[in-house]
Amino acid sequence: MTLNQIRTALYRAMLCISASILALNVLLILYSVFTRYILNHSPIWSDELSRYAIIACVMQVMSCAYMDSRHMKVSFVEQIVSARLRNMIQMYQWLVVLGVSLFFVYVSARYSLSMGKFSSMGLGISKTIPLLAIPIGFTALFFMALTKGPYSSPEQVRGDLC
């Protein structure tokens, strides 16, 4: 398997997972609205699950936004400097993304695991389970950034959803 195939497979998997979670979240919200306004009874777990689903969706799609260069950054400086300085800026940005994502993998994993003694009110499960979406998302960002490299273009990875 080539690096481009790995990158594309990871990209498609993250995009498919986040789209599935988003679709689940929409169905969950529709269910919650139906039960609240039609049946006059909304289960407490639906709001909590919806909140965790949107967090998981954002954390999974974050790496795809990085691959597509759709994340927030100030890029006008890269356009007005020499090619050598542009390469240095891109290398610096890449190293920062790798470092910050690894740091947040560590911090969020420790936090998620420390929440194991608490359970969520609505779902009745350990808070560790939904909070693991955060270190998983930062791990995906790390590997996507690693496979993208500092000088690659956003057109390298495109594909159909799922």
Image (tube, rainbow, N blue to C red):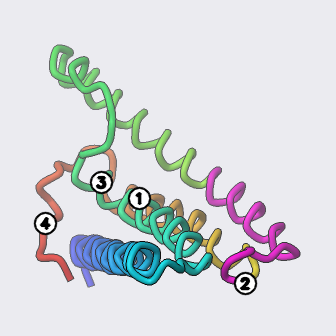
Q: Secondary structure at mark 2?
A: loop
Q: Nearer the viewer, residue 150 or 10?
A: 10
Task: Give coordinates of residue 24: x percent, y percent.
Answer: 37, 80
State the CA–CA distance, disc 4 to disc 1. 17 Å
Crowd band around label 4 with a 10 angstrom C-alpha radius: few (<14), some (14–19), many (20+): few
For residue 13, say whether it is visible.
Answer: no
Q: CA distance from mark 2 to mark 4?
A: 37 Å
Residue type beneath disc 1: Leu
Marks 3/2: CA–CA distance: 31 Å
Q: Residues within 10 Å of mark 2 (few under 14, many from 20)?
A: few
Identify the residue at horizontal 45%, vertical 64% (top origin).
Answer: 54
Could you classify mark 1 by the number of other residues whose Cα lies within 10 Å: few (under 14), some (14-19), or many (20 or more)? some
Whether residue 133 can be seen here: yes
The residue under label 4 is: 158
Tell me the element at label 3. helix
Find disc 3 in the rendering and name its residue. 65
Provide the residue span drawn in magenta: 103-124
Tell whether 158 sits left or right of 60: left
Quadrant hosting residue 111: bottom right
* Front in this rendered view, residue 132 or 29: 29
